[in-house]
Image (tube, coloured by chain):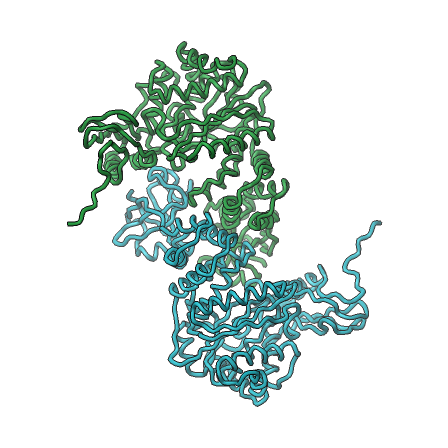
Chain colours: A green, B cyan
Amino acid sequence: MKMKAQPYDIEVGRYEIIVNATDADELGIHAGDRVQVKNRDTITAVVETTDAIIPPGRVGIYREAWEALKTVPDEVVEVIPAERPRSIQYIRKKMDKQKLTSEEMHDIIADIVKGNLTEIELTSFVTASYIYGMDADEIEWMTRAMVKTGDQISFDTHPVMDHHSIGGVPGNKISLCVVPIVAAAGLLIPKTSSRAITGAGGSADLMEILAPVSFSAEEVKKITTKVGGCLVWGGATNIAPADDKIIGVEYPLSIDPRSQLISSVMAKKYAVGADTMVLDIPMGNQSKIATIQEARKLARDFIELGDRLKMRVECAITYGGSPIGRTIGGGLEVREALTMLEKFEGPTSLIEKTLAISGMMLEMGGVAAKNEGQKMAAEIVKSGKALRKFKEIIEVQGGDPKITSEQVPVGDKVATVLSPQDGYVLEIFNKRLVAVCRTAGAPHDKGAGILIHKKKGEYVKKGDGLFTIYADKEWKLDAAIKESLRDPIMFVEGMVLEKVQVV
Amino acid sequence: MKMKAQPYDIEVGRYEIIVNATDADELGIHAGDRVQVKNRDTITAVVETTDAIIPPGRVGIYREAWEALKTVPDEVVEVIPAERPRSIQYIRKKMDKQKLTSEEMHDIIADIVKGNLTEIELTSFVTASYIYGMDADEIEWMTRAMVKTGDQISFDTHPVMDHHSIGGVPGNKISLCVVPIVAAAGLLIPKTSSRAITGAGGSADLMEILAPVSFSAEEVKKITTKVGGCLVWGGATNIAPADDKIIGVEYPLSIDPRSQLISSVMAKKYAVGADTMVLDIPMGNQSKIATIQEARKLARDFIELGDRLKMRVECAITYGGSPIGRTIGGGLEVREALTMLEKFEGPTSLIEKTLAISGMMLEMGGVAAKNEGQKMAAEIVKSGKALRKFKEIIEVQGGDPKITSEQVPVGDKVATVLSPQDGYVLEIFNKRLVAVCRTAGAPHDKGAGILIHKKKGEYVKKGDGLFTIYADKEWKLDAAIKESLRDPIMFVEGMVLEKVQVV
């Protein structure tokens, strides 16, 4: 059918058009069907229908399709029904509990990256993968497909180190210490990180306070080759770009399918050329992994996938029941991490975890003898080498290498929550801490966060500060205080959580 | 956050807004999250984010939300993060294979109807329901929820009859004959039908050739009370409106979950006040139900749900391997059905099926003795009572009661496909027939369709017509001829389906 093109300037992440329902009837198509749109070029697009916005005889063309067609308003284009991508059959196959082949998995992932699938089709793939899981073959194929459909880096020298935490524990700023330590020991570590989705700040959000973090894959290689390491945002690199689109569906459903978690992490590491990595699995009843059995199973799955990809993977099961260090949120976390590199001072949970993970990497990377890694890591910090290396990294990424921990800005709107009584801190509710940080403005407001004065097992007196909320904006501080009072954040021995009284 | 309202005049089926990614960051929200939007009124809407279309400080408000807020361009509204609807937790429960309660099912269906769920959330509910199925309780609860969330009819006299075919067999125009026969016998039959989604024409598409079919629930009651029966389009009635939204997800995935099929049919029947119904289950390797075991299982499920809803349900398992009658598509089917009522003439498959289904209903409705229904149905047709009743129905729905079968328009662009050789017709490929009808213009072009000259088991000579394609438009006829040659539609004994030669 010949139709007049009309720009419909909305970004939808795929080639999409919108036609009047009468024309859709005439063409024998429905919303969600595919059509070919032809002028000098031909694209395949998904159809939306409308009763009102687009009159019969015209076709509304969304931004991505408009740019691809290089058409002009009112140009006559031809719209004809087209077949659905084959990958939809493979999604059906997964919905019917059948194992996918390597090629089928690749087709699905490639169509996700190209924007060939609608939100409905992508969601049903994610939901079916969540319900059935994937076997080791499928996970490998998905990982390889995610790698192939994005940019890749390879280094001329080896080993190439990497580390990753599966997350779920607040205040986990250790990458800011681990990367400089490992690079200072002469190993390559091209570290890409994510931004917070539901947390108070990812490593990329933290590093951004010190230097730019958006680089292409090629730039990541250049930076790493030059100074040994980097701390960049994975989202800017076009490395394993399928991941972001899949997360876009998982996030609103609050799901994190195991198969997807494993392949997403490993694809990103594989694609930056890493061959040796340490995976941190925080375990505890408030983190993603509740039991040691679950943690071990996950560790085995990572190691198996590593084998298949010829990557050496070791896992550290760590304590995830309590925040790492005493700070959560942007500037506060960066201060704590910098202080640790400057003076080798800070909370035990931060220092121990940093040295343990760094130590494993130094041993795996062949620069420390067995059981000597942790000691070597401590020396690298104590000698100031780690700090110098971090500043080199900050400089080459375009930040100010002269910055000190005191200079890192934190919010000037503060409020301290006091203990209502004497007693030991028996529990800290991580998710509540994060919720208050987010209400205070994290991760967007870099000064927003929480400084914890008393951690689990510490004794507190009535009227002592339990934690201080920092914010950049007065109204966000007020909201955060309100949020902090809504449900308890810490549990002090003998405290009544809520009174339910019959009057 | 205070933002300036900007209309974003697109219909999306739910309350939705779009904000700049910077503002989303500032608010700590992501695409798919909910916000409250406040001016004098408050609505809860789903958030989309953009880097470009909406500048910071402004909020684009889609049509439905715009109308609900009654705002004006540039008015300052407040946007604050809101909680997700509880029904999303229940969807997660279903994804985790847990049984839903009656209240949870109702919340999900109510949120679907109100447009409170995003496409991602709705799709994951449909996918999980497809994968796990539902037990008899859940199906009952879903049915009741679908009824309650739409309009309902109740009649003062009983029984109220209904019939339904689960579909999958082309040319199934029998409702046009069954409804008049049952109504002529003095029974009430408020028949709502669907339009074709993937077929060549639903009963509503056919009836529309003779009279308007869009009526409210109240009008359906009025018409039925007046003349005993009607043939209207269910989609216009606001009866069980959840169904259309769910089908909107099932269609692009090409799935038809059993639980959804059963509750959708029964909700529509229950909501029009029917208490006695006959369900037609076409069975055969080309229809939806391949084996007699499957058909019986489905029949039992329908009957059990009927028991729970206090509806009397009987099922007819019919032959679905071949089209009903010799016509497929709008005007051709209406002609065939009218001829049957006018002269009691027509293909055996049409006459027998009409009388069998009508007969069951006459017996269940208590107007025919056991085993006498079919005979009585035949007499109602022979005596002309059925034809007179049909014309009453056509008239009260606003059509022309004087119409005769010859006057029903059919396409004037025709082409007959001839047999390439002598032999018996061994197979007719239903899906191919339907594909050719749709390419010829059905269901949109009312004159488009196919007249079959030779059916299964009939002898054909080389050069005899196998079938004739009708179309309203020359270019669609051409496309249909091309489509009919692409893959075989009929298989004549000894015919080579395709030659694969090594040259």
From this viewpoint, which residue is outermost toward the right? B503
Could you tell me residue A488's position as x and y percent? 26, 37
Q: Is residue B456 visible?
A: yes
Depth check: B37 or A250 in front? A250
- Viewer-closest of A146 and B397: A146
Which sits in the foreground, A324 or B339? Answer: A324
Query: Which of these two is toward me, A69 or A124?
Result: A124
Residue A149 is left or right of residue B29, and the answer is right
Q: Is residue B40 left or right of residue B279?
A: left
Residue at (49%, 58%) from the top-left corner? B248
Residue at image position (50%, 77%) is B211
Position of B165 compared to A385: left or right?
right
Extreme-top residue of the structure: A383
Q: Is residue B120 above or below residue A337?
A: below
Q: Position of residue A485 (x, y in %)?
A: 23, 38
Asked where in the image residue B318 lies, by quadrant, the reply is bottom right
**Farthest bottom residue in view:** B383
In which quarter of the view is residue B253 placed? bottom right
**Above or below — where is A348 with respect to B213?**
above
Q: Is residue A441 visible?
A: no
Residue B456 is left or right of residue B33, and the answer is right
Q: Position of residue B89 (x, y in %)?
A: 39, 49
* Quarter in which the N terminus of chain A is drawn: bottom right
Total of numbered circles in the picture?
0
B471 relative to A178, above or below: below
| Residue B497 location (% of width, % of height) | 77, 60
